[in-house]
């Protein structure tokens, strides 16, 4: 098929890489280059980098609402547009351009977790499974008909980064399957049940500060959900410490935020219910370290309190 591909991050690049093996990519749409990293250097998106490696035409409009970009897309005479974590709204005029419309690779089992952060919200909520939905795009926010759904379990130790990588591979496989079925006229659209829909709001840095009054199981899920961004944080005497990994310790009680013990296996902190053993931590200006190394540079004694949050 002749495809226009629209996507920006690594999740989308995985799908583009798979599509290149079986289809003709007419052009690639991706977000404009933006500053990134500690040096804030202007950086091309993973999708753009991959597209350039394969000599593809790359388009980086700030909006798809202008007649100029819509005319340029129409001239490509694409069979379908495949969209994955693109980041721009597709107006009705663009949705109607390709012969088969626009298919979205969404990282959730719709209608659960419509929106910007479905992977993280699924972990935060304690969902047992996640998945991929290939959706026929309409003008709503992830409201279109479902064309293909595949699920995978969320492991008890899965971070957002780990689940992202699983779903990126699944998404690539699913879009290839969906396009094969589309070519055979075997896709059967299914309406979403609006009553089961929920919204996966964009992540905010302010969410990452740990409130030790919450149950330890909720905090542990948050630590996994916010790895690698925005990374859970705790304050100790005003110093912000990033928490990358922790383990739930059931049955231990104490005043929320109180350090129960600190040693080579971790720093155990009491929560509203049960406790957490902090195992991988990061000081300001430092790198993520196992607790044993962290404590050598920043000793923490039992009886100390983390700030409430």
Image (cartoon, helix red, strand yellow):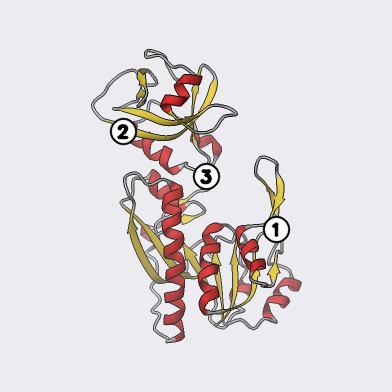
Residue at (36% x, 58% y) in the render: 196
The residue tagged 2 is 248
The residue tagged 3 is 203
Query: Horizontal placement of 121 versus 137: left or right?
Result: left
- Placement of 83 over or under 229, stated as above or below: below
x and y, in percent, of residue 48 in the image: 65, 63
Q: Which of marks 3 and 1 is in front?
A: 1
The residue tagged 1 is 32
**Extreme residue in the right direction:** 68
- Placement of 292 over or under 1, stated as above or below: above
Q: Would you identify the image quadrant in which residue 102 lies?
A: bottom right
Spatial separation of the CA atoms under disc 3 and disc 1:
21 Å
Residue at (55% x, 63% y) in the render: 13
Label located before the other in sequence (1 or 2)? 1
Label located before the other in sequence (3 or 1)? 1
Residue at (45% x, 65% y) in the render: 171
């Amino acid at each position: 098929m002749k495809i226009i591909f629209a996507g920006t991050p690594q999740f989308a690049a995985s799908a583009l890489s798979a599509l290149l093996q079986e289809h003709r990519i007419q052009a690639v749409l991706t977000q404009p280059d933006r500053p990134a990293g500690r040096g804030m250097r202007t950086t091309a998106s993973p999708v753009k980098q991959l597209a350039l490696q394969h000599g593809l035409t790359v388009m980086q409009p700030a909006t798809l609402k202008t007649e100029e970009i819509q005319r340029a897309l129409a001239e490509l005479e694409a069979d379908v547009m495949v969209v994955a974590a693109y980041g721009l709204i597709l107006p009705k005029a663009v949705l109607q351009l390709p012969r088969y419309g626009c298919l979205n690779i969404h990282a959730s089992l719709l209608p659960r977790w419509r929106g910007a952060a479905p992977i993280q919200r699924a972990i935060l909520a304690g969902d047992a499974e996640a998945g991929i939905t290939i959706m026929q795009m309409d003008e709503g926010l992830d409201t279109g008909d479902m064309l293909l759904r595949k699920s995978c379990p969320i492991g008890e130790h899965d971070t957002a980064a780990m689940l992202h990588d699983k779903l990126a591979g699944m998404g690539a496989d699913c879009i290839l399957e969906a396009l094969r079925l589309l070519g055979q006229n075997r896709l059967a659209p299914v309406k979403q049940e609006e009553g089961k829909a929920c919204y996966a709001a964009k992540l905010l840095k302010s969410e990452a500060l740990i409130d030790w009054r919450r149950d330890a199981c909720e905090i542990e899920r948050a630590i996994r959900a916010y790895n690698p961004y925005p990374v859970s944080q705790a304050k100790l005497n005003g110093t912000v410490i990033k928490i990358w990994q922790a383990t739930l310790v059931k049955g231990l009680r104490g005043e929320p935020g109180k350090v129960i013990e600190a040693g080579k296996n971790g720093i155990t902190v009491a929560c509203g219910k049960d406790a957490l053993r902090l195992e991988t931590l990061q000081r300001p200006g430092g790198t993520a370290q196992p607790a044993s190394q962290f404590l050598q540079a920043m000793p923490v004694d039992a009886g100390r309190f983390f700030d409430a949050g």
